[in-house]
Amino acid sequence: MKKAIAKIKASLTHNVGIKIVALVVAALIWLTVINMTDPEKTVMIYSIPVEITHEDAISDMEMVYEVRSDKYVNITISGKRSVVSGLSADDFKATASLKELSKVNSVPIEVVAKQGSKARKVTIEKQSVQTLMVEVEQIKKENFDIQVEYSGKAATGFVPSKYTLSKNNVSITAPNSILNSIDRVVAECELEGNSTDFTNRCRLLLYDSKGNIIRTKHVKMSSRQVYVTVQIDEEKEVPIEIGNIGKPAKGYEIKSTILSLDKVKLVGDNGVLNSIDRILLEKDIDISKSKDKYTKTFDLKKYIPAGVTINGETAVKIEIEIGKMATKTFDIKNSDIEIKNQGENKIRIMDDVKVTLQGENEVISNISSKDIKASINVDKLDKGEHSIPLNLKVPEGTMVMEDVNVKIKIK
């Protein structure tokens, strides 16, 4: 046994230097082979989502935030090819803690390998973005009145008139910019062809001044819905009439009359509506002193009984164009003048005469001298020359502008 041990010892100690060199060379050869079969490699990992953490750091200050930059980050990693080749964005985690929000509203982005992933064996060389940009804004609360707007239509001949709400306003908590953009809060109510009163639960919508619905996660409302009770009444359309409005100043006529509305829709109880067949405005129009244009706006609500409302425009404007009457001068021949109470006297009318009439243009333009009846009365006149009034009978709608005398000679 001792001989065997001595023999082994002699073999191990024989040529020790050569054996050490051989061992080192073998190790180097092994490392070279390993590196050649699984070399180092650098790759890009794209679109790792950035997770926002510690949001309470903002909310505790009664503020909200909005991310203004890209929420994804790309990284460059290096490691063994066998490791990096199988990695993706799912092997890494990117976080941005709002606790570290800077004065310029940026948050540093940290990228690490996920627990249990082979990514822990690689090195992250660089990342595409270092910070996440956010916008922070103060939260406030404000109350808004609720309006009701209808969609659809009631049954034919019926319309919604009055409504009541389970609550008349709503409290909204939101950033200043959103509160300032709210133009109205609307309870949207569907009519569904109703002909009788009804109550519906209606959702609340926020609208801006351009009529767009405001949609954002940063709005908290004390209520999202309200109950709306709608009164349904009958509807009747009646004309608006001017009636007899008299005449303008002397020598003037009405050229045209324009109403901004010629009919209006009334809403109310059927029994009351049946008693209304028109709205007449004549009692409140006085053009007796007008020489140019008469304009007046009427509040139609004053012309309807209690319990009746107007669906649509409640004011009507009247414009009456007034202008001078037309005038025209006619030649009346002396032979066309009738002589009354001539008796046995010989009477000669010395000259023809001119008669000027005034009247509405339509009337004046359609008459001639033949439509004017002229006469004189010579009763109780002595022989000689006289200047006497000419009696005139003129067409209806006209008037003589000035008195006319004629010269006669009696023999």
Image: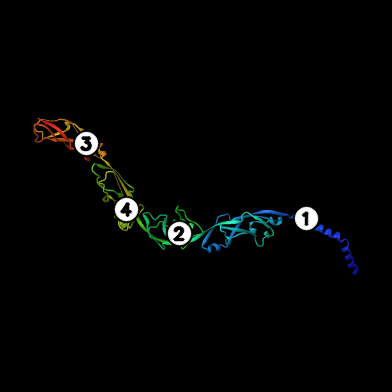
| Residue 270 visible in the current orientation | yes
Residue displayed at 37% across by 55% down: 158
Which residue is at the front of the view, 323 or 234?
Answer: 323
Q: Name which of mark 4 and mark 3 comes first in the sequence.
A: 4
Label 3 is placed on what type of residue? Answer: Thr
Kindly report which numbered mark, 3 or 2, lies closer to the viewer in this rendering. 3
Return the disc, 2 or 1, that comes first in the chain's sequence.
Answer: 1
Q: Determine the residue located farthest toward the bottom in the rendered image.
A: 1
Colouring scheme applied when the structure was drawn: rainbow
Could you tell me which secondary element the residue under label 3 belongs to?
strand
Looking at the image, residue 349 sits to the left or right of residue 60; the answer is left
Q: Looking at the image, is mark 2 or mark 4 earlier in the sequence?
A: 2
Q: Amino acid at mark 4?
A: Leu
* Residue assigned mark 1: 32
Disc 2 marks a residue whose amino acid type is: Leu
Q: Earlier in the sequence, mark 3 or mark 2?
A: 2
The amino acid on which the numbered mark 1 sits, given as a three-letter code, is Thr
Alpha carbon separation for disc pair 3 and 2: 74 Å
